[in-house]
Image: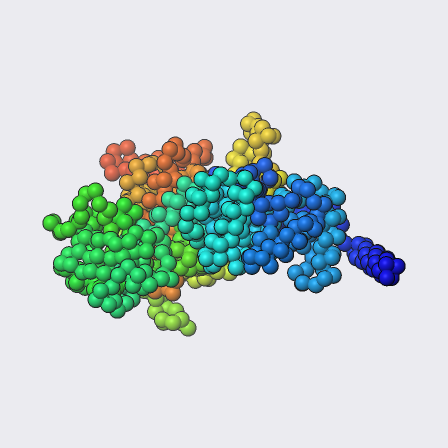
Amino acid sequence: MLRWTFNLLLAAFLVATAAAAIVVWYLVPGLPAVDALRDMRLQVPMRVYTGDGVLIGEFGEKRRIPVSLTEVPDIVVKAFLDAEDDRFYEHPGVDWQGIIRATASELRRGDRGQGGSTITQQVARAYFLSPEKTYIRKIREMLLALKIEKELSKDEILALYLNTIFLGQRAYGIGAAAQVYYGKGLSELTLAEVATIAGIPPAPSAYNPVTSPKEALRRRSYVLRRLLEKQHISREQYDLAMAEPIETRVHGLRLEAEAPDIAEMVRQQMVEKYGEETAMTSGYRVYTSVDSKLQAAATRALRGALMEYDRRHGYRGPERNVQLPPDSTASHWQQALQGIPALGGLQPAIVTRVGEQTVGAYTAAHGTIEIGWRGLSWAAPYVDKDHRGRAPRTAADILKPGDVIRVQLEETASEGEAKDAAAAEKGAEAGRDDEPRWRLVQVPVVQGALVSISASDGAIQAMVGGFDFQQSKFNRVTQALRQPGSNFKPFLYSAALDAGFTPASLINDAPVVFDTPGGVNPIWRPENYGGEYNGPTRLREALSASRNLVSIRLLSAVGIDYVADYARRFGFANERLPRDLSLALGTGVATPLEVVRGYSVFANGGYLVDPYLIKRVETIDGVLVMEADPVRVCTECETAASGSSLSVDPMMRPARIAPRVIGADNAWMMNSMMQDVIKAGTARRALALKRKDLAGKTGTTNEQRDAWFSGFNAKVATTVWVGFDQVQPLGRDETGARAALPMWMKYMSVALDGMEEATMPQPQDLVTVRIDPATGNLARSSDADAVYETFRSNEIPLQDSDDAALGHGADVPADQGPEQLF
């Protein structure tokens, strides 16, 4: 019997040995090389920053914040080891004792303690093996774990594990989990929060503290108990952590500035350059040209301008009404507001009570609030784009219980809204001075855009493509093709100067009628805004007052094809410009980004720059991947190339020089003429900025469908636009000066803060003389009404000369002179 038993054991041993040998012979050669782990590239999302290092966006399927082992608090390491693999630093990659203990624990208590797989096995499975559950895969996992332990240090393996373990909610690694569940960094976590995260790995769905708080609490208790058993925490720490509620929610990435249009534009450019997978998983850090302070100012300016427009046209009513029970409570109100996001900083609220001139409401973020008459009295009902209804006298004229509305704290309201509130009826309820004042508001239907660029190299400093990116992801700065209206006139006037006209050239400002065979209307009667006509008018005055009839006659004199081709110098697409006289009124189409690029030519003295957004791209380790090399304005380089004695330091010379597209004399005269738009023309409101270096042009299209303002000094150019996405009139008197200019002013007040006045130096070829404002001729010394005007030295008008009154050079034939046009 003994001999039989011995033979049986020997046979079993030989069979087991043979089986092991077969397994090793079959499986080991197929194991992947562990060297790949050393150079393993973690799938880290791309992050987008402003030029001053403020985070504005993150893109990538997996949320991951890589951390080095030295950055991980000791208690975090101990929590994961005690919960998952307390013999990690002792076993060779496979822990037979751990397997036996895990099996016994599950049979004895029915809970999931430490698993049978070591941390090394989990790393092997995550990196190299499929998730299938078969004996062959398990054996491969063990063999690979043993191989990994021979080639990597324990710390290297642990760092890989802590950075790659899936912890639910798309969070990979402990850094991402801390952010997702608690909105914190690892060093900010409490003991209870550490234990909660450390309990997730065995079953990320079942132990997810957001979706399964009860199971997560049970698992947290196990982790805390293990820490106590291993004497890594005290009994007092254990008791405090056990008593802490398991309150958590999914936290989005903590963006430090609001610039979603910019972040999305960067994403598109990165995907186009590097491909979807590389761009989204390589951990690139993309630094833009945007200034976070200016971006915040741009967002405030755009939202404020759109809300002021919206208020002028009346209250459209609540977004919806919910039937509330008579004894409704906060739970009813919360349910009514569920799923309604804040838009543009405007919080959703539900009306719970209506008094004589007060309204009680509830918001998810602030609880119960009260809106006084100061915040309600503006809400006369909207009738149509040109009319409002009767001003309300009581709160019941505006709202009723159950209405879902939008509210805003007065301190964040626009300047115009604050003035309206201050003008509310005397004696109206406004709350105590130390209480927050809430205002009834509404999400504007009208839209807008703002883009600001550096005149010297085209760097985009701020960009807002709409009221709220969540509401509409359409970027109106880069995607909206709109008629610029009178905002196009400076390019026409620049073409006229190039063709030999001067700022003193006279054009007749008088009505005219055109036959348009085959057109929608057989007769075209263009008009000036306001219906007034001034007769013979100097170009400077005509541009300042935006005289339509002068522009049409000027286009006819210079030539439609000439002006359309000339506009290409400023970057406009030739195919989008009409080949008829309506071109003078800006009936072509362009994006705000194209318009501001064109205006930057006037700002920088005549050079065409290319707007750009990405300044540099770095790896997660700070290695430079790409750096922008934009064309830059270099006036000194041009001077040196012309044979001047001035030289340019090679170290200061740009690698790529912006091409000159208009002459310096042309650019200076256009600057001067557009400064008059602000000094005495349609943009006089901008005098409130109290600067002498500003120039620009308002723009309004037919029936006020689009409102523009583009303005600049020698360093920065900014364009703003207001209009409806579905093209329709903005309403009576909603011109560029009223609807758009306030946005530009509010932004530029920040952009110019602390900036010295920057003007273009006058070219030597230009001469300033006194002229007769009525004729454009050289004035007599006794002429008391004379004004100063600047001319090219070869275009100074003669005194008492009929030809000089035309103010154009020999390049324009006399039979095409302005007085012969109509």
The residue nearer to you, when weighing 96 against 809, is 96
Q: Quadrant for the N terminus, please.
A: bottom right
Name which residue lies at 26% across and 69% down.
323
Name which residue lies at 17% across and 63% down.
397
Image x and y of residue 455, in percent? 46, 41
Image x and y of residue 239, in percent? 44, 44
Q: Quadrant for the C terminus, please.
A: bottom left
The residue nearer to you, when weighing 254 against 641, is 254
498 to the left or right of 406: right
Relative to 722, does residue 782 appear above or below in the rendering?
above
The residue nearer to you, when weighing 767 against 343, is 343
Name which residue lies at 43% across and 43% down.
240
The residue nearer to you, when weighing 115 against 606, is 115
Name which residue lies at 36% across and 71% down.
521
**Can residue 518 be spotted in the picture?**
yes
Relative to 605, does residue 640 appear above or below in the rendering?
above
736 to the left or right of 139: left
406 to the left or right of 111: left
Image x and y of residue 76, in percent? 54, 42
